Amino acid sequence: MATGGGNIADAGSSNPIIAVESDDGFWRDDSGNALHVSASDLERHTYCPLSWSLAREGKSGKGEAIDAGRKKHAEIHEKMNLFKQKQNDLKKALIIWSWWFTIVIIFITDALIFTNITDTNAPVDFARYLTILSLIWLVLGLIAIYLPWRRWTDSQISELDEIQEISTLEDEIIPFTFQPFGFIGGWGQGGKVEAGLLIGATIFGLHAIALMWAEDKEQAGFILVTVAMVWTLMASWQLQRALLADSAVETARIDAGIDENMELAYSDDDSTAGLLVDDHTGVRGKPDQIVIVDGEFIPVEQKTGKIPDKPHKSHRMQLLAYIHLVESTTGRTPPYGVLKYGSENLHSIDWNDESKHTLFSAIKEVQRLMVEGGAERNHNRKGKCQSCSRRYACDSSLV
């Protein structure tokens, strides 16, 4: 049931906003969709409703602080992306090393088996069988990669033991990150079945090659041990790459200002980062970063410029919006979010019932102003007007 309504020309647009206030207090259009309110809208409105209104009219912020802030944010995101890249390089190096080390163990085990079994078949016969098995597994692996067999069988990949990264597809965040998402096959998405088939094909093929030149079981065992030693050298080289990658990750982590107990899951680079959306309230936005701490997604909002004694209310409101978006997007409730001023000045903002009420009240007020208009200056502080980047366009400025 609608409790209010109205329309007003959308600032900067010739199309009017027509919406009514729903029973839950949020304003929705004729289709039942909540009016869109960005986290930046909430930040500007909390700072000063007039500043928010001017921004909607197309009056962009001006000043050296704005330009410096944009440059600083670009540098921060570049460091975050570098850290994420180095982190991925380390994971890949460790996975490859673990595969190669597994092959070494298998070769040594088979060498012991060959030297102790009864010589019922010549090694060359085993080589033929292994060659056939290798080809079969290779074909199955290729089929599993290129055909969407999970979709056909209506099955999904289970990754409950791993934290899935927040990914961006078509500029939208993947919902319910801790749950399996629609994997339809493909090596690029890391299917365990595909990986197992290809590793099996590799192991069978190497065994077949090694046994082709063996005349008896003793010689077969010797060849397998020799191959294991060669593969051990290759695994050692890969381990060295992993150690170098780990060192690079540590350097990038320190440079990016990320704690040891954090894992970066998301960083907003203004171009490819996904937009978090909550259709119920209409809130949307892109936090600067989302990190994983103790298995929980924690949004981080990075602020540049002068470091305050305590977090600004406008910054706190923006962070609350991001915490709510992470909660509605992932299906998990972050216990807090982090406001970061500079590299070391951190403030933890709790997410509780009081915070939710504060956020939802602000969302509803912004939506009301979008429909009814009437934004006014809500303070008498000359210093705030002096620092406002839209003071040049404001006719109610105190200075």
Image (spheres, rainbow, N blue to C red):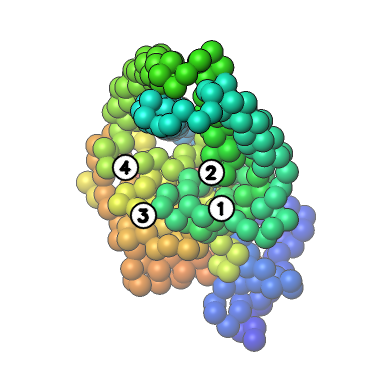
Left or right: 93, with 281 as reference point: left
Which structural element holds mark 1? Answer: loop
- What residue is pinned by disc 2? 192
Mark in the foreground, 1 or 2: 2
Q: Position of residue 242 (x, y in %)?
A: 36, 23
Which of the marked residues, 4 or 1, is nearer the chain's N terminus?
1
167 to 304, vertically: above or below: below
Q: Is residue 148 above or below residue 187?
A: below
Sequence-wise, the earlier of marks 1 and 3 is 1
Please state which amino acid type lies under the numbered disc 2: Lys
Please identify the quadrant where the C terminus is shown: top left
From the viewer's side, name the closer residue of 343 and 331.
Answer: 331
Q: Quadrant of residue 375?
A: bottom right
Q: For the residues labelled 3 and 2, say whether their Cβ atoms are less than 8 Å apart.
A: no
Give the amino acid type for the residue marked by disc 4 in the picture: Met
Specify which label sits upstream in the sequence, 1 or 2: 1
Q: Which residue is mark 4?
A: 262
Up-down: is 160 above or below 28?
Answer: above
Local secondary structure at mark 4: strand
Callout 2: helix, strand or loop? helix
| Towards the viewer: 351 or 55 | 351
Coordinates of residue 345 in the picture (x, y in percent): 24, 40
Q: Mark 3 or mark 4, which is nearer the start of the sequence?
A: 4
Disc 4 residue crowd, few under 14, some 14–19, many 20+, Cα 10 Å: some
Q: Going from the N terminus, do you reach mark 2 or mark 4 first?
A: 2
Q: CA distance from mark 1 to mark 3?
A: 21 Å
Q: Secondary structure at mark 3?
A: strand
Pointer 1 and pointer 2: residues touching (CB < 8 Å)? yes
* Residue picked out by circle 1: 157
Residue at point 43%, 49% (across, down): 163
Check disc 1 and give the amino acid type. Ile
Dot label at residue 296: 3
